[in-house]
Image (cartoon, rainbow, N blue to C red):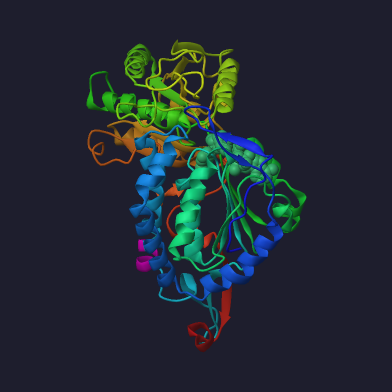
Amino acid sequence: MGHWLRSDSSGRQIRSAVTGETLGVLGGVPDVAAMRDYAKSHGGPALRALNFHDRARMLKALALHLKAHRKALYDLSFLTGATLADSQIDIDGGIGTLLVYASKGRREMPEGFVLPDGELEVLSRDGSFLGQHVLTPRQGISLQINAFNFPVWGMLEKLAPSLLAGVPSLVKPASDTGYLTQAVVRLIADSGILPDGALQLIMGATGDLLDCLDAQDTVGFTGSAATAMALRSRPSLLQNAVRFTSEQDSLNGSVLGPDIEPGSAEFDLFITEVHREMTTKAGQKCTAIRRIMVPEAHLQAVTAALSERLAATKIGHPAQKETQMGALVSQAQREDVRGKLQLLAGECDVVFGDAQHCVVSGADAKEGAFMSPVLLNCPDPDAAKTVHEIEAFGPVSTVMAYRDVPHAISLLNKGGGSLVASVITHDPQVARQVVLGAGAFHGRLYFNDRVSQAESTGHGAPLPHMVHGGPGRAGGSEELGGLRGVKHFMQRSAIQGSPDMLSA
Ligand code: NAP
């Protein structure tokens, strides 16, 4: 509502992931109903007074402003356990998402206030009565509840399409890393680029905000399946038909194609992709590879090559240049991962790593939330349940053997719906089989080989142009994916009338 409130000093302590020291305290609940009213009375009308191209230019200005202040954000991001490379995914990735939406707004949307959708439909014999679908901005708020792992990208990837649609946002970051989100919001507020009320921030608890929402509002949730279930099933949200999207945990898989032999370019690519997904953000990525599927004949070779790469991975203070893997977000998160590993241990064997010990450079392994990567082997993936159900949200992945492509597809689909599945193959027929057999279970299918590897974006990278989200276990929603992401914040209406009515 145009000013900052100080947190209640008796609240929850927020600690550095690297040293465990207290960074600040989060407590108290602001007047959330008044914040929503303010967004609706100030932010909404101001945004709707701008046309799509004005809003796109605003996104571009925002991106350039944040880009100029990246260094300060990287410094803060180290405290979350993220290395510079991790922070670039979060911070530069978020800025990049703003830029892509800015460009799409200018190129793919009209310089107007209404977004036509589809062709004109002729509903009369003489052409005097026509129909056209159009989208207009919803007149509520976009409530964004985000996960701890991407405090910047997580906000900007929802904010960009919402602002382009013309809808004001209330952002609630996860408590553990919300201070980085807050730094970005402060930069945005100080820039004066957004109209008053277009963006507000709630740190910590949201009070009864969810119960204040109505059918013009949207909730965009990112986090665990358990929290999603608790939030989306609230009677007031169901009663008011509040649009609720959920991006939640997912047991993403990666398949080494049956055509790939050890020593080939694709074999090395597979090891590189899996290793990157296990160690980037210390494995705290919703798109990380949790299940590694390899032909029976190459199980040993893959396990040996991955173990060698993991053993050479330098774990340490995230600000050190040579560090390849930083810390988990908190000691509580490390305990959570250790607990999940115990559950997985009933059906899997540890083939690399020790969750209780690791060598850390430049920081204290106990005070900071550091952890060794752990590679598991699941000897009977058809009978096993936990490996297809439990997400250890850290540097943990499980290798398993498959017999043939239909078997690999059945294992991929056992995750019950994922954000992304990848296949490293040089055989287009394998890709065809996987799309037909697994497409319905995954939000994104990523194929890579010697032809595309140099320019490919990586198994784990969501792109604003492409669907991010997945069916079932992954939340059953879609974010991003080009203009579909923008349309989500708008209402599609069928407009019927004479040619004059429709052209107006
Ligand atoms: P989480 O514990 O489920 O929390 C997610 C968000 O919900 C946080 O902002 C949390 O706030 C908030 N929250 C919890 N209870 C709430 C309530 N009663 N009312 C309002 N907000 C509430 O998840 P997390 O530990 O932050 O994130 C890790 C999980 O997110 C992993 O399972 C991961 O797979 C998933 N994830 C998915 C995606 C995706 O795009 N699909 C992306 C990233 C992460 P507090 O922090 O204040 O509790």
What residue lies at 47% left-to-right and 74% top-to-bottom? 50
Q: Quadrant of residue 322?
A: top left
Is 298 placed left or right of 376 in the picture?
left
Q: Where is 311 relative to 334, above or below?
A: above
Q: Where is 343 relative to 193, above or below?
A: above
Image location of residue 158, percent across then percent down: 50, 53
Q: Quadrant of residue 333?
A: top right
Q: Quadrant of the N terminus?
A: bottom right
Image location of residue 294, percent across then percent down: 39, 21
**Residue 151 in magenta?**
no
Q: Nearer the viewer, residue 259 or 448?
A: 448
Quadrant containing ligand 1 reads: top right
Q: Range of the magenta residues?
A: 103-108
Q: Nearer the viewer, residue 334 or 310?
A: 334
What residue lies at 73% left-to-right and 52% top-to-bottom? 208
Report if residue 362 is visible in the image: yes
